[in-house]
Amino acid sequence: MKRKCYFSFFLIINLLLFNFSSFIFTDSSAPTPGDQIQTNIQNEFKLKYMDSLNVVKSEYGVGDKEDFEHAQLSSGTAYYKISDDPTSSELVFAGYIFSIKVNHIAVGTIYANNDSGSWEIFNISNNVSYEQPLSAAQSSLKDGEEVKLVSDVRYGINVLYINGITGERIVDLNSSNAKSSSLRTENTISKSVFDEKIKSIKEKRAASPAKGGLLQMGSGQVDFTNTEESSNSNLPVDPQTLNVGVYTILR
């Protein structure tokens, strides 16, 4: 009898652990964060960052009569980075970004990840270039197509990955040309060309590593001027001013 009880208890515990692990995995790679993640980030923002942001609010275009005490955070969206594998250009889930809005105007972006075992803010930027292009791309997708936001400071990239009926392509969000009424072909390269460029950057860095093991942030940025493959799928995007400098709040 005792053996049956122990066995039943063992099965129940394993089922609970399996379901819990499945929940964590799903919640940590979903297109949008769950309610608990949103709550954690909102609370951390208010407790640790709000006062500091008010000190430098001019850097975020916030006027004297406004402040971050009334800021609203978006529901959040997943973003991706380039794989750490030196031989791979795969896009891997990195965390979630949340737009910070003051009086309904986007003034900054929160980057959150789970590297330490819990969801935390690791960077706040005044770069607000992603929201409108991402929304426009999502609204233009057909069945079976997908779009991912890719942001990786190591390579100085802020792009959209779109897998559509015309194939895989990468749209640059940093280019000054992206201020036009549509994201034109000069801002777009195929995923295969993008992969080759990332591979080339990684090979150059491996050949001349930084002193002291420091990461080469933003050096060897991806060049979008080489449009070897033409894209016929311009997106109807009218993004806000791009190329906004990054301001990191240090804790």
Image (spheres, rainbow, N blue to C red):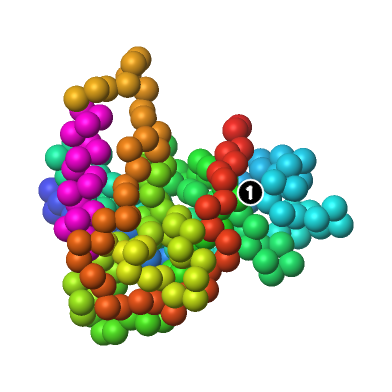
**Quick check: is 194 in the magenta stretch?**
yes
* For residue 95, side relative to residue 188 (left or right): right
**Left or right of 123: which side holds 141?**
left
Graded by Cα atoms within 10 Å as few (under 14), some (14 to 19) or many (20 or more), the crowding at tag 1 reads many
**Seen from this angle, which residue lies furthest top?**
212
Place of residue 130 in the rendered image (x, y in percent of width and height, measured from the top left): 48, 62
In the rendering, at what x and y percent does residue 123 appear? 53, 42
Q: What residue sits 59% from the left and 41% below the top?
A: 247
Q: Is residue 23 visible?
A: no
> Does dot 1 land on a helix, a strand or a loop?
helix
The location of residue 164, given as percent across then percent down, is 24, 76
Residue underneath mark 1: 45
Image coordinates for residue 168, horizontal then vertical, percent: 21, 67
Tell whether 204 sits left or right of 212. left
Instruction: Classify residue 8 by image quadrant.
Output: bottom left
Q: Magenta segment, principal secondary structure?
A: helix
**What residue is at 43 percent from the left and 46 percent from the top?**
113
Q: Could you tell me which residue is drawn at 19 percent across and 25 percent down?
A: 207
Q: Residue 31 occupies which quadrant of the picture?
A: bottom left
Which image quarter holds the C terminus? top right
Picture residue at 36% right of the left edge, 63% below the top: 187
Q: Residue furthest right?
A: 65
User: Is 176 located above or below residue 208 in the figure?
Assistant: below
Q: Does the magenta portion include 57?
A: no
| Direction bottom: furthest residue | 143
Q: Nearer the viewer, residue 184 or 52?
A: 184
> Considering only vertical position in the picture, is 105 above or below 3?
below
The span picked out in magenta is 190-206
- Classify residue 15 as left or right of residue 65: left
What amino acid is found at the position of numbered circle 1 in the picture?
Answer: Phe
Q: Is residue 241 visible?
A: yes
